[in-house]
Amino acid sequence: MWRIKFCPEAKNDLKKLDQAVIKVVLAGIKKVSTNPLPQQEGGFGKPLGNVGDTNLTGFFKIKYKRSGIRVVYTIVRKAEIMNILVVSVRDKNKSYKIAQNRKDQYGKDLFKDIF
């Protein structure tokens, strides 16, 4: 299992959710952390790329259809860390725009052990 780390904003995103939804989201993140690599490498990772006005190449998503939540994360392969960047409502491209803003804020640090 890879270590799971949340950027401070993602922690705040999570706290805004209903307690029952938080449990579902954390269970999904835990499951994906067993192998967060891209699907083409046998993992659970659903790669993102250019989505709308964003460039999220190197990022992955977890979709929670029933609760309407999307999680965006990246990985630090050498350290086996899964950095959670966004926990947001699946509202068109909202979560991707938030992810792009946080990517711009943290830059290359997202691919390091920083949180």
Image (tube, rainbow, N blue to C red):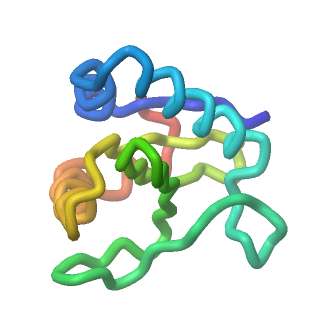
| Relative to 23, residue 45 above or below | below
Quarter containing the N terminus: top right
* Residue occupying the point 38% across, 15% down: 19
Report the side of 13 relative to 27 (left or right). left
Q: Spot the residue most to the front.
A: 66
Is 93 drawn above or below residue 103 in the view shown? below
**Image-based side of 110 in relation to 39, left or right:** left
* Image location (x, y in percent) of residue 102: 22, 51
| Residue 2: quarter of image | top right
Q: Residue at x 22, y 83 (%)?
A: 52
Whole-percent x, y for residue 32 in the image = 68, 45
Query: Which residue occupies 58% across, 31% down?
Result: 4
Q: Quadrant of residue 9?
A: top left
Q: Is residue 32 left or right of residue 47?
A: right
Q: Could you tell whether 43 is left or right of 76 in the image?
A: right
Viewport quadrant of the C terminus: top left
Residue 42: image quadrant is bottom right
Foreground of the two, 112 or 54:
54
| Front in this rendered view, residue 53 or 28 | 28
Which residue, as the protein is rendered here, is positioned at the far top? 19
Comparing 88 with 37, the one in front is: 88
Q: Residue at x 45, y 74 (%)?
A: 48
Q: How many marks?
A: 0
